[in-house]
């Protein structure tokens, strides 16, 4: 489909419209002046070498050259496959828990830090796929839509923290629904969600999300971040462990049962993340076994276009050159 790289320049075409009215006003003025000179036969003899049609032609050539120049500046273009590469892969959305419980240190340095380290390692093994990123706590936010540039995920990770979502909680259901929305392809396969959370809070929306994901052919791989034994939640603001209203230290525990259920009901698998690197290999092995589709990618994940501006510039210059060789004098007249 044709499009313009710089559509704002198209407004210049409106500026050209008054030129048409000015030109025809000039023609009317010239006719009036010629009529006021005196005898019509005498005026006709004086102007017998003048060709009014060539005068109009010269204007049309210049006007068209200006219009083509505006179109060239606006950058008319069409999608092109030049410079693109095709590979077999799937669409993957990583859903990362950023609730306060992810500050627990039963996995060093914290659950959130270990999850971010895992994502960095994963991106190095997911090059032939498209990847997006959703962060969630009490609500879910699409942080990065699907992109061929898998490494772009690492650009967002330094800014991911537990303060980026004001509503606290672990809305797993909302995270799954937001991830599904990011996987907007109508295909009922070639799609996966990697859910990284401690799954601590039960979410009533989760059951509905699981059914919808299964119906749409989306596989969910769940990664448990933390330990069943749990650990206190460190609060950076106070420098102390979080306490409940009774003054007791809050212990955050990994909810493995819910994560296993999500994975099982969507055809995925549950992986416990501890202090080893087994999780990376397990995830990539499972993703590599999924049915792939053809993914078209360009340099740095950008779309390539065929540009038409050289044609417009070339034709505009040709018209101006033709205009130089056209005189307003009739041939054979002196």
Image: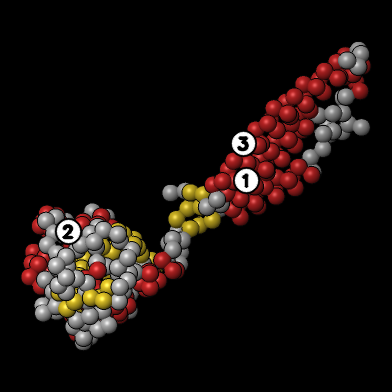
Above or below, 60 against 286 in this view is above
Find the distance from the CA under tag 3 to the CA under tag 1.
11 Å
Give the residue displayed 30% in from the left and 61% down from the top: 165
Give the residue displayed 17% in from the left and 58% down from the top: 173
Give the residue displayed 17% in from the left and 67% down from the top: 244
Which quarter of the picture shows residue 193? Answer: bottom left
Secondary structure type for disc 3: helix
Above or below, 148 against 17 in this view is below
**Front-most of 103 and 146?**
103
Q: Which residue is mark 1?
A: 70
Taking 307 as reference, is 181 left or right? left
Residue 173 image label? 2
Secondary structure type for disc 2: helix
Closest to the camera, between mark 1 and mark 2, is 2
Q: Which residue is mark 3?
A: 14
Which quarter of the picture shows residue 256? Answer: bottom left
> Total number of numbered labels?
3
Secondary structure type for disc 1: helix
Q: Residues within 10 Å of mark 1 (few under 14, many from 20)?
A: many
Mark 1 vs mark 2: which is more N-terminal? 1
């Amino acid at each position: 489909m044709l499009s313009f790289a710089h559509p704002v320049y198209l407004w210049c075409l409106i500026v050209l419209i008054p030129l048409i009215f000015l030109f025809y006003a000039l023609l009317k003025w010239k006719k009036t002046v010629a009529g006021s000179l005196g005898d019509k036969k005498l005026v006709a003899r004086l102007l017998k070498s003048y060709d009014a049609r060539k005068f109009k032609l010269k204007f049309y050539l210049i006007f068209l050259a200006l219009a083509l120049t505006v179109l060239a500046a606006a950058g008319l273009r069409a999608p092109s496959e030049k410079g693109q590469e095709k590979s077999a892969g799937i669409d993957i959305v990583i859903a990362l828990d950023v609730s306060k419980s992810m500050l627990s240190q039963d996995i060093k340095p914290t659950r959130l830090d270990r999850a971010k380290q895992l994502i960095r390692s994963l991106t190095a093994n997911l090059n032939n796929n498209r990847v997006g990123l959703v962060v969630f706590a009490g609500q879910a936010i699409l942080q990065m839509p699907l992109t061929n540039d898998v490494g772009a995920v690492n650009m967002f990770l330094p800014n991911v923290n537990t303060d980026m979502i004001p509503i606290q909680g672990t809305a797993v259901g909302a995270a799954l629904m937001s991830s599904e929305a990011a996987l907007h392809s109508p295909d009922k396969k070639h799609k996966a969600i990697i859910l990284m959370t401690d799954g601590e809070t039960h979410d009533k929306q989760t059951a509905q999300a699981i059914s919808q994901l299964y119906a749409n052919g989306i596989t969910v791989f769940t990664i448990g971040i933390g330990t069943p034994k749990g650990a206190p939640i460190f609060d950076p603001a106070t420098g102390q462990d979080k306490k409940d209203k009774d003054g007791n230290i809050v212990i955050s525990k990994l909810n493995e049962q819910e994560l296993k259920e999500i994975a099982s009901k969507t055809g995925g698998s549950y992986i416990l993340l501890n202090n080893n690197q087994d999780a990376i290999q397990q995830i990539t092995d499972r993703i590599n076994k999924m049915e792939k589709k053809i993914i078209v990618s360009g340099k740095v994940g950008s779309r390539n276009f065929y540009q038409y501006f050289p044609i417009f510039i070339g034709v505009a210059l040709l018209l101006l050159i033709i205009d130089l060789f056209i005189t307003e004098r009739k041939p054979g007249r002196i």
